[in-house]
Amino acid sequence: MAVFYILLLFVIIAAIIAVETKNLLSAVICVGAIGFGGSLMFLFLRAPDIAITQIVVEVMGLIILIRATISRDLTFISGDREFFGTVVSVVIVFVIFLAGIHVFDTLPDFGTAVFTQVPDTASQTYIEEGLERTGAANLVAAVILDFRAYDTLGEATVLFTAIIGAMVILRGKSRKLLEDPD
């Protein structure tokens, strides 16, 4: 549980830096760190579907924000780095690495069903009562379309919106500009 609080502290620090920094690119990177920390927390809380959705939305959002930031803010990288900034960067990467190791150590061995280790889980209910409650012959379809229909619809909507948004932002010149003879 201590790793969860460390991740929470990391997210709070990244949020404060994102709000207080004057450099737009640094703020965008901190917003990305917030999303990455949130996805690690979802993985730590054993919600991999939400963690995957968070990562996809975060990557698409970062692509959009970095594209907008680079076009508005001229950022130059010099060879002269501050010692404090380097140390903070190394510490943050190390904390993320340790959190990732801890999360993967808490997961069961590959091939072991998680629902067999925890009694009274939703998956046990799906298996035991799925046929009677839904009438579906296929248990996977019953879970996706009956038990978790709104969740599946929400995830599909988020993924679709993120992909369409990235395509709109990253496309080349519009067709109107290509057809314009001027």
Image (tube, rainbow, N blue to C red):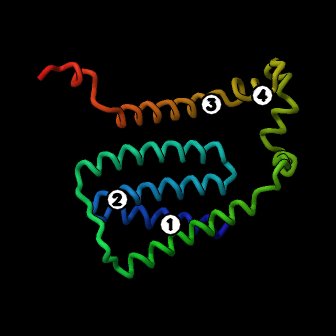
Residue under label 2: 27
Compute the Cα span from label 1 to label 4.
37 Å
Secondary-structure class at tag 2 = helix
Percent x, y for residue 54?
54, 46
Q: Give the amino acid type for the residue marked by disc 3 in the picture.
A: Thr
Q: Give the amino acid type for the residue marked by disc 2 in the picture.
A: Ala
User: Mark 4 packing: few (<14 Cα in 10 Å), some, or many (20+)?
Assistant: few
Sequence-first tag of 2 and 1 = 1
Q: Nearer the viewer, residue 8 or 52?
A: 52
Q: Residue at x 71, y 24 (%)?
A: 146
Secondary-structure class at tag 4 = helix
Q: Give the amino acid type for the residue marked by disc 1 in the picture.
A: Phe
User: Mark 1 packing: few (<14 Cα in 10 Å), some, or many (20+)?
Assistant: some
- Marks 3 and 2 close (CB-CB < 8 Å): no
Q: Give the amino acid type for the residue marked by disc 4 in the picture.
A: Val
Q: Which mark is residue 152?
A: 3
Residue under label 4: 140
Sequence-first tag of 3 and 4 = 4
Residue at the outermost left position = 182
Q: Nearer the viewer, residue 80 or 169?
A: 80
Residue under label 1: 10
Compute the Cα span from label 3 to label 1.
30 Å
Sequence-first tag of 2 and 4 = 2
Secondary-structure class at tag 1 = helix
